[in-house]
Amino acid sequence: MRKMTTEELRKVEGGSITFNATYLNAIYKISSLLFEIGKELGSSIRRFATGSTCPVK
């Protein structure tokens, strides 16, 4: 294998981003995590606003 010159290295272009199952799975997990955080935050705000919290025993 020969070494590339500096000029050849400057002309190298990277590959394109492909959406495979790994990317889609990561996007799904992030979106479901954000949804769950929003749901819990909304429930906490509602319980605090209405004063309907469970007593700690």
Image: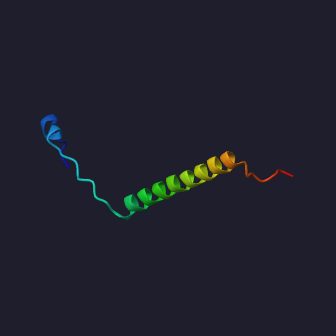
Say which residue appears at 63% left-offset and 50% top-offset: 46
Foreground residue among 18 and 6: 18
* Image side of residue 41 versus residue 18, left or right: right
Q: Position of residue 11 (x, y in %)?
A: 14, 41
Which residue is located at x 65 percent, y 49 percent? 44
Q: Is residue 48 above or below residue 5?
A: below
Image coordinates for residue 49, horizontal then vertical, percent: 66, 46
Residue, far bottom: 21
For image coordinates 73% across by 52% down, the residue present is 52
In front of the other: 44 or 25: 44
Q: Residue 13: give x, y in percent of width and height.
A: 18, 46
**Please, which colouring scheme is shown?**
rainbow
Would you say 5 lies left or right of 53 here? Answer: left
Residue 17's spot in the image, x, y percent? 27, 54
Q: Residue at x 68, y 46 (%)?
A: 48
Residue toward you, 44 or 24: 44
Which residue extends farthest top? 6
In this view, which residue lies farthest toward the right? Answer: 57
- How many marks the image carries: the answer is 0
Q: Nearer the viewer, residue 24 or 47?
A: 47
